[in-house]
Image (cartoon, helix red, strand yellow):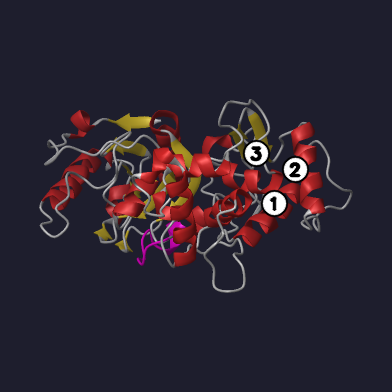
């Protein structure tokens, strides 16, 4: 990785203190969205890239409408593959569209535009993956990789770069961020990378009795159509495709690699399938991680709401409904809020702030 520090490219001090962020769900990829000269990609033009970084920062600091604290991106990648440090690690971006989106993902920008230099170079794609890896290793970024337009109405990061994101953000040699499973190719549209949950690996190439248990449960739940010989102890593309079908049934969107329904488990979807999280047990490991307050907005849908609803029904807090009984589902309704509020009022530690919107402690107590 060719990392260029803020000091090395001549960054100005931040206008305001940058907000700390402990972790993110992943990384969103951006482009400049303006004219970028094709000459910037010339082999002898790398000396101009630091100046371009200073120009981007200056334009952001001068933007009175947005009132940016600093350059909006966590990192910017030039056509020669160098990763320029922007806001950096554990700093909330200002680039993703709104405060909720900025808190969900880091932002990496490529020095390509809407005209002129519109196609990322191979070195640049390598550099973007380097930046993603850097944010994962040092900034606790999650596994997902998306484009700016995912969740926000914009043309960013441009069609060529967005097509690359949808293909799994592979390096030019075919490997995905973090190397996938042993650095294998992404296998077309089937996700081939691994995650670790409670000390156990899931995803293409993972093996063990826990993989068999996932497959058998998928079959029992009616999600086994991609198996030709039945589930086994090694995770194959069939396991990924069946788990993707299950995630879609929960309301997750996007089946391309590194999207929410790509067939690689996350803690919430795995808990929803198995009823618990196998592996290294702690006092709270049976409870899926809190998905964040943004999952619970009245009138909006999120798969985590179904998990919440099952906890409400199991604990007996389903009094409020539309007349047809309270049914678990992905939509957070006013009935959901009132049932959560009733649960909060029943718990002394929660009663003082019983607004009906789950926080981490409400989530833990309801699902434990």
| Residue drawn at the location 58% of the way across and 46% of the way down | 268
Quarter location, residue 23: top left
Answer whether labels 1 and 3 touch (C-beta < 8 Å): no
Q: Badge 1: few (under 14), some or many (20 or more) residues near its Cα, within 10 Å?
A: many
Q: Looking at this view, name the residue that lies furthest to the bottom.
A: 323
Viewer-nearest of discs 3 and 2: 2
Residue 203 appears in the picture as rendered: yes
> Where does the image place residue 344, in percent across and percent down from the top left?
44, 48
What residue is disc 1 on? Answer: 243
Q: Nearer the viewer, residue 209 or 311?
A: 311
| Residue drawn at the location 81% of the way across and 52% of the way down | 219
Q: CA distance from mark 1 to mark 3?
A: 20 Å
What residue is disc 3 on? Answer: 184
Q: CA distance from mark 3 to mark 2?
A: 23 Å
Label 3 vs 2, first from the N-terminus: 3
Q: Nearer the viewer, residue 78 or 25?
A: 25
Label 1 vs 3, first from the N-terminus: 3
* Magenta span: chief secondary structure: loop
What residue is disc 2 on? Answer: 214
Say whether residue 367 is left or right of residue 206.
Answer: left
> Where does the image place residue 97, in percent across and percent down from the top left?
30, 58
Label 1, secondary structure: give it: helix
Q: Nearer the viewer, residue 45 or 267?
A: 267
Label 1 vs 2, first from the N-terminus: 2
Q: Badge 3: few (under 14), some or many (20 or more) residues near its Cα, within 10 Å?
A: some
Q: CA distance from mark 1 to mark 2?
A: 9 Å
């Amino acid at each position: 990785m060719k990392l260029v520090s803020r000091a090395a490219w001549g960054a100005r001090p931040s206008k305001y203190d940058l907000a700390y962020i402990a972790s993110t769900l992943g990384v969103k990829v951006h482009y400049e969205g303006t004219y970028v000269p094709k000459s910037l990609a010339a082999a002898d033009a790398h000396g101009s890239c630091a100046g371009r970084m200073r120009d981007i920062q200056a334009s952001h600091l001068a933007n009175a409408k947005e009132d940016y604290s600093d350059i909006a991106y966590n990192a910017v990648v030039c056509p020669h593959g160098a990763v320029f440090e922007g806001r950096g690690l554990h700093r909330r971006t200002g680039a993703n569209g709104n405060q909720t989106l900025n808190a969900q993902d880091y932002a990496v920008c490529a020095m390509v535009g809407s005209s002129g230099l519109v196609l990322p170079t191979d070195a640049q794609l390598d550099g973007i993956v380097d930046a993603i890896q850097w944010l994962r290793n040092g900034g606790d970024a999650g596994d997902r990789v998306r484009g700016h337009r995912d969740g926000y109405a914009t043309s960013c990061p441009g069609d060529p770069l967005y097509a690359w994101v949808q293909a799994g953000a592979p390096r030019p040699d075919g490997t995905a961020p973090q190397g996938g499973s042993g650095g294998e190719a992404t296998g077309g549209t089937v996700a081939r990378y691994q995650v670790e949950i409670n000390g156990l690996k899931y995803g293409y190439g993972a093996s063990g009795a826990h993989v068999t248990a996932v497959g058998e449960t998928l079959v029992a739940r009616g999600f086994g159509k991609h198996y030709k010989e039945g589930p086994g102890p090694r995770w194959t593309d069939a396991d990924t495709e069946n788990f993707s079908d299950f995630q879609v049934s929960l309301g997750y969107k996007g089946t391309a690699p590194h999207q929410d329904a790509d067939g690689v488990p996350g803690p919430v979807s795995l808990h929803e399938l198995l009823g618990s999280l196998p592996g290294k047990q702690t006092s709270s490991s049976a409870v899926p991680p809190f998905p964040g307050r943004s999952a619970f907005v009245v009138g909006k849908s999120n798969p985590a709401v179904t998990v919440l609803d099952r906890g409400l029904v199991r604990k007996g807090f389903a009094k409020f409904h539309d007349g047809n009984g309270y049914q678990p589902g992905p939509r957070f309704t006013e009935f959901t809020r009132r049932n959560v509020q009733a649960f909060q009022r029943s718990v002394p530690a929660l009663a003082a702030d019983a607004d009906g919107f789950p926080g981490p402690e409400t989530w833990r107590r309801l699902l434990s």
